Image (spheres, grey):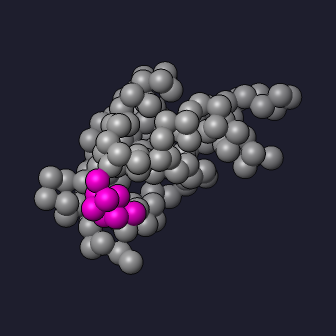
Amino acid sequence: MASGVGVNQNVLDTYQELKLGKKHKYIVFGLSPDNTEIVVTKTSSDNSYETFLADLPEAECRWAIYDFEFERPGEGKRNKLLFVTWAPDDAKIKQKMLFASSKDALRRSLVGISTEIQGTDYSEVAYESVLDKASRGSH
């Protein structure tokens, strides 16, 4: 079921800056204060995965795009655009439902994402867990 939430044009522009221009390492998205559209809440060019995790609030839902770089033995460096759905256990039920029903509108508007990560606690979005998912899908 779609929520009727729109995707702000700035979301698409910022995504293109990350995807094509490599201006950002990651983008965090949330809902506008009136819950009518998806907006950019943070961008960063910090290469630290820990910094990215710190930008996922403990009790609020977010989506994020992360330009994930990793190495595979014998293949060298790889890049994957990750789509992260962050719905922590401590978030309010109503917010989780709104984020779940709005996800498809955002996901469909962001072309070129290869891996989706769902997180309800930090262990599910930990570097090793994400590395495992990202590298499995790249042969």
* Name of the residue lying farthest toward the bottom: 1
Task: Provide residue 101's location: percent of width, then percent of height.
Answer: 37, 68
Q: Looking at the image, which residue is at 31% across and 64% down?
A: 98
Q: Is residue 106 left or right of residue 95?
A: right
Residue 40 placement (x, y as % from top left): 28, 45
Q: Is residue 75 magenta?
A: no
Residue 76, picture quadrant: top right
Considering depth in this image, is 94 or 9 the residue closer to the camera? 94
Identified at 32% across, 49% down, the residue is 91
Residue at 59% of width from left, 31% of height from top? 127
Image position of 41 (left or right of 19): left
Query: Residue 15 versus residue 116: which sits nearer the camera?
Result: 116
119 on left or right of 75: left
Q: What segment carries the magenta color?
A: 92-100
User: Which of 77/127 is in front?
Assistant: 127
Vertical arrangement, residue 115 with respect to residue 76, above or below? below
Residue 95: in magenta span = yes
Kindly report the secondary structure that dominates the magenta region of the rendered protein.
Answer: helix
In this rendering, would 54 be left or right of 4? right
Q: Is residue 57 above or below residue 6?
A: above
Instruction: In this rendered view, identify the residue nearer to me: 99 or 105.
Output: 99
Whether residue 64 appears in this view of the structure is yes
Q: Residue at x 47, y 47 (%)?
A: 120
Quadrant of residue 26 within the rendered picture? top left
Residue 96: image x %, image y %? 35, 58
